[in-house]
Image (spheres, grey):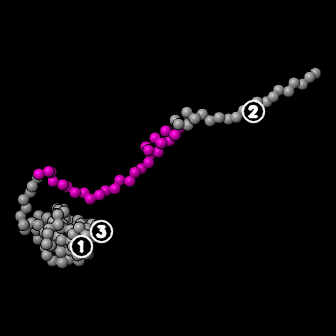
Amino acid sequence: MRVVKKKREIVVGEISTPGMADIAFQLIIFFLLTTVFMHEHGLRLVLPEKGEEVRVKKENIAEVYVNARGQVKIKDIEVPVDRIREFAEQLLKENPKLIFSLYVDHRCPYEKVIKVFDELRLANAKRIAFAPPRRGK
Protein backbone atom coordinates (compact mmCIF):
# COMPACT_ATOMS: atom_id res chain seq x y z
CA MET A 1 0.00 0.00 0.00
CA ARG A 2 1.19 3.19 -1.08
CA VAL A 3 0.57 6.35 0.86
CA VAL A 4 -0.13 9.28 -1.32
CA LYS A 5 0.74 12.53 0.21
CA LYS A 6 -1.30 15.43 -0.94
CA LYS A 7 0.21 18.80 -1.03
CA ARG A 8 -1.49 21.04 1.38
CA GLU A 9 -2.61 24.36 0.08
CA ILE A 10 -1.74 27.29 2.24
CA VAL A 11 -4.83 29.35 2.73
CA VAL A 12 -4.16 33.04 3.15
CA GLY A 13 -6.92 35.01 4.87
CA GLU A 14 -8.19 38.00 2.99
CA ILE A 15 -10.25 40.88 4.26
CA SER A 16 -12.99 42.07 2.03
CA THR A 17 -12.36 45.76 1.35
CA PRO A 18 -15.85 46.69 0.03
CA GLY A 19 -17.31 45.63 3.36
CA MET A 20 -14.81 47.81 5.23
CA ALA A 21 -16.06 50.92 3.48
CA ASP A 22 -19.61 50.15 4.62
CA ILE A 23 -18.46 49.65 8.18
CA ALA A 24 -16.48 52.90 8.10
CA PHE A 25 -19.52 54.88 6.91
CA GLN A 26 -21.71 53.25 9.54
CA LEU A 27 -19.21 54.23 12.25
CA ILE A 28 -19.08 57.79 10.96
CA ILE A 29 -22.88 58.03 10.98
CA PHE A 30 -23.05 56.49 14.45
CA PHE A 31 -20.57 58.97 15.93
CA LEU A 32 -22.21 61.94 14.19
CA LEU A 33 -25.58 60.98 15.65
CA THR A 34 -24.36 60.22 19.16
CA THR A 35 -21.86 63.06 19.64
CA VAL A 36 -23.07 65.93 21.79
CA PHE A 37 -21.90 69.28 20.45
CA MET A 38 -21.51 72.19 22.82
CA HIS A 39 -23.75 75.11 21.95
CA GLU A 40 -22.31 78.39 23.09
CA HIS A 41 -24.71 81.13 23.99
CA GLY A 42 -23.45 84.51 22.91
CA LEU A 43 -24.84 87.89 23.77
CA ARG A 44 -28.57 87.97 23.32
CA LEU A 45 -29.28 91.18 21.50
CA VAL A 46 -32.45 92.40 19.88
CA LEU A 47 -31.51 94.35 16.81
CA PRO A 48 -33.89 96.83 15.18
CA GLU A 49 -35.19 96.24 11.69
CA LYS A 50 -33.45 97.98 8.82
CA GLY A 51 -34.59 101.56 8.53
CA GLU A 52 -36.44 101.46 11.86
CA GLU A 53 -35.89 104.61 13.88
CA VAL A 54 -37.09 105.12 17.42
CA ARG A 55 -37.18 108.50 19.11
CA VAL A 56 -36.26 108.46 22.80
CA LYS A 57 -36.46 111.32 25.27
CA LYS A 58 -33.06 112.57 26.43
CA GLU A 59 -33.93 111.98 30.10
CA ASN A 60 -34.48 108.27 29.34
CA ILE A 61 -30.90 107.77 28.13
CA ALA A 62 -27.89 107.15 30.35
CA GLU A 63 -24.69 107.48 28.34
CA VAL A 64 -22.01 105.03 29.42
CA TYR A 65 -18.50 105.78 28.15
CA VAL A 66 -15.65 103.28 28.33
CA ASN A 67 -12.28 104.75 27.36
CA ALA A 68 -9.18 103.00 26.03
CA ARG A 69 -7.91 102.21 29.55
CA GLY A 70 -11.25 100.67 30.58
CA GLN A 71 -12.37 103.54 32.80
CA VAL A 72 -16.15 104.00 32.90
CA LYS A 73 -18.25 107.16 33.03
CA ILE A 74 -22.02 106.97 33.43
CA LYS A 75 -23.84 110.28 32.93
CA ASP A 76 -20.42 112.04 33.12
CA ILE A 77 -19.72 110.53 36.56
CA GLU A 78 -16.68 108.25 36.77
CA VAL A 79 -17.72 104.91 38.22
CA PRO A 80 -15.36 102.04 39.10
CA VAL A 81 -16.23 98.81 37.27
CA ASP A 82 -17.07 96.99 40.51
CA ARG A 83 -19.59 99.75 41.45
CA ILE A 84 -21.43 99.89 38.11
CA ARG A 85 -24.18 97.52 39.27
CA GLU A 86 -25.08 99.62 42.33
CA PHE A 87 -24.97 102.85 40.34
CA ALA A 88 -27.13 101.41 37.56
CA GLU A 89 -29.65 100.00 40.06
CA GLN A 90 -29.95 103.47 41.62
CA LEU A 91 -30.54 105.06 38.20
CA LEU A 92 -33.15 102.43 37.30
CA LYS A 93 -35.02 103.08 40.56
CA GLU A 94 -35.21 106.76 39.63
CA ASN A 95 -36.24 106.03 36.02
CA PRO A 96 -37.40 102.48 35.10
CA LYS A 97 -37.59 103.45 31.38
CA LEU A 98 -33.84 104.19 31.31
CA ILE A 99 -31.81 103.02 28.33
CA PHE A 100 -28.06 102.59 28.80
CA SER A 101 -26.23 103.77 25.69
CA LEU A 102 -22.77 102.16 25.68
CA TYR A 103 -19.98 104.10 23.91
CA VAL A 104 -16.70 102.19 23.81
CA ASP A 105 -13.29 103.35 22.60
CA HIS A 106 -11.99 101.02 19.88
CA ARG A 107 -8.72 100.54 21.82
CA CYS A 108 -10.48 99.31 24.95
CA PRO A 109 -9.85 95.62 25.78
CA TYR A 110 -12.82 93.45 24.89
CA GLU A 111 -12.87 91.89 28.38
CA LYS A 112 -13.59 95.32 29.89
CA VAL A 113 -16.53 95.88 27.53
CA ILE A 114 -18.03 92.50 28.47
CA LYS A 115 -17.47 93.23 32.17
CA VAL A 116 -19.33 96.56 31.88
CA PHE A 117 -22.12 94.93 29.86
CA ASP A 118 -22.43 92.11 32.44
CA GLU A 119 -22.56 94.57 35.34
CA LEU A 120 -25.38 96.47 33.64
CA ARG A 121 -27.27 93.21 33.04
CA LEU A 122 -26.77 92.21 36.69
CA ALA A 123 -28.29 95.55 37.67
CA ASN A 124 -31.41 94.35 35.81
CA ALA A 125 -30.95 96.74 32.92
CA LYS A 126 -33.10 95.36 30.11
CA ARG A 127 -32.37 98.09 27.58
CA ILE A 128 -28.71 98.45 26.66
CA ALA A 129 -27.66 99.93 23.33
CA PHE A 130 -24.22 99.68 21.77
CA ALA A 131 -23.60 103.04 20.16
CA PRO A 132 -20.88 104.11 17.72
CA PRO A 133 -18.11 106.14 19.35
CA ARG A 134 -18.52 109.89 19.29
CA ARG A 135 -15.78 112.18 18.12
CA GLY A 136 -14.19 114.31 20.82
CA LYS A 137 -15.24 112.28 23.88
Estimate the x, y position of residue 49 in percent, counting from the top left: 15, 51
Q: Residue at x 68, y 35 (%)?
A: 13
Measured in 3D between alpha carbons, the distance from the residue under mark 3 to the one under mark 1, in whole angstroms, is 12 Å
Which residues fall within the magenta stretch?
A: 23-51
Q: What residue type is labelled 2?
A: Ile
Residue 94, relative to residue 49: is it above or below? below
Residue 10, relative to residue 40: is it above or below? above
Task: Give the side of residue 10 with respect to residue 120, left or right.
Answer: right
Estimate the x, y position of residue 128 in percent, counting from the top left: 18, 63
Q: Which residue is under mark 1?
A: 68
Task: Give the side of residue 74 with respect to residue 25, left or right.
Answer: left
Placement of the N terminus among the 4 image quadrants: top right
Foreground mark, 3 or 2, reads 2
Residues 84 and 90: in front is 84
Q: Which residue is under mark 2?
A: 10
Circle on res. 132: none
Estimate the x, y position of residue 101 in percent, counting from the top left: 15, 65
